Amino acid sequence: MKTPYLEISHIGIEFTTEGEPFRALQDVDLSIDKGQFVSLIGHSGCGKSTVLNIIAGLYEASEGGVILEGREVDKPGPDRAVVFQNHALLPWLTVYQNVELAVKRVFRKTKNKAEMHEWIEHNLSLVHMDHALHKLPGEISGGMKQRVGIARCLAMQPKVLLMDEPFGALDALTRAHLQDSLMEIQTSLGNTVIMITHDVDEAVLLSDRIVMMTNGPAATIGEILDVKLPRPRNRLALAEDADFIHYRQQVLEFLYDKQKNPQIEKKPTDAARKLQEVACKPASSHDDAAVDTGKTTTGTDKTRAA
């Protein structure tokens, strides 16, 4: 039987909040093969980031554990690099120096100065930032900062790249460019990637598997969707692709039908409250009641989970 590259084995975690126990995760069980791109998706509060932090070694599970290449994960390490939504660059260091910091930490005993210099430039070129080596973070755009953050992680040569909504704070066009770059890098390097996202289209476009989480507390894996779209993937060609649309619909059905957002369900709209108030009035007053239900707008992207 094939041994999984990364095994998340029946993990659960409990926190103490205001003196009371809070069960965040329950029996999360997942095996990931080397080179797979896996997305975690679900409503806010379903424990996606908690799963990622346990894999990173930042949290210790109350039950179960994580095994990477046959070794238990019990602390943070360079074999699991994390890309956060905030790029976390040091503002007083240049683009080159921010990546250099990670390279020196990991390779100070195995690479000489010339090799490290070549390696830093190579990883910045992967994210198309080799033209801005000597710029400070304050001199480049948000999307460029995130590219540098990704280069810094890649330069550590991690076994697993962990990404916590890395493109969530970017505008749609920049996000699309970075998604395309990430697909190019993953195809070239064969990285094992676990990414948290709220964006359904992003999950289907990038992933080999989409792990859909149930609502918390005691959140767990609800469904796993295998995305068998051929690579390389072109977003324009996939826009009207029947298989892409089918996968997208399956994720939407899970999020908006099988796992309705409890935060939304608990907050009736002003219109709903007014209708309830009218319904509770005596029958004689119903004829004269004027109900202003207001205008509803749906400005949110329906392909994004709340």
Image (cartoon, grey):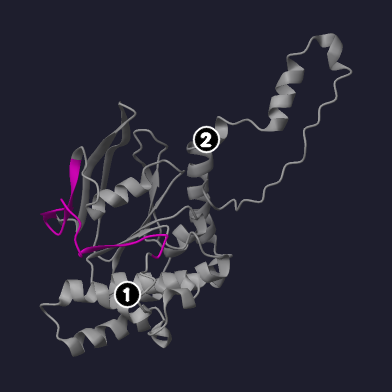
**Considering depth in this image, is 168 or 231 the residue closer to the camera?**
168
Which region of the structure is painted magenta?
A: 64-87
* Residue neighbourhood size for the residue with mark 2, other residues' Cα within 10 Å, grouped as few (<14), some (14–19), many (≥20): few
Q: Quadrant of residue 45?
A: top left
Side of 35 where 272 appears, left or right: right
Residue assigned mark 1 = 98
Where residue 18 appears, as percent x and y from the top left, is 34, 28
Can residue 231 be seen here? The reply is no
Label 2 with label 1: CB-CB less than 8 Å = no
Mark 2 or 1 closer to N-term?
1
Q: SS of the residue at dot 1?
A: helix
The question of residue 131 being in magenta is answered with no
Say above or below: 109 vs 283. below
Q: Give the residue type at disc 1.
A: Asn
Crowding near pointer 1: few (<14 within 10 Å), some, many (20+)?
Answer: many
What residue sits 52% from the left and 64% below the top? 170
Give the side of residue 305 with respect to residue 153, left or right: right
- Tell me if residue 85 is in the magenta stretch: yes
Compared with 304, 101 (above or below) is below
Quarter where residue 34 is shown: bottom left
Question: In the image shown, does 225 or 63 lie closer to the viewer?
Answer: 63
Q: CA–CA distance between discs 2 and 1?
A: 39 Å
* Residue at 28% across, 69% down: 191
Q: Quadrant of the N terminus?
A: bottom left
Along the line of sight, which residue is nearer the eye, 219 or 232?
Answer: 219
Q: Position of residue 75 (x, y in %)?
A: 17, 53
Vertical side of 51 occupied by 272: above or below: above
Three-letter amino acid code at the position of disc 2 = Gln
Please give the residue where the numbered disc 2 appears in the rendered image: 263
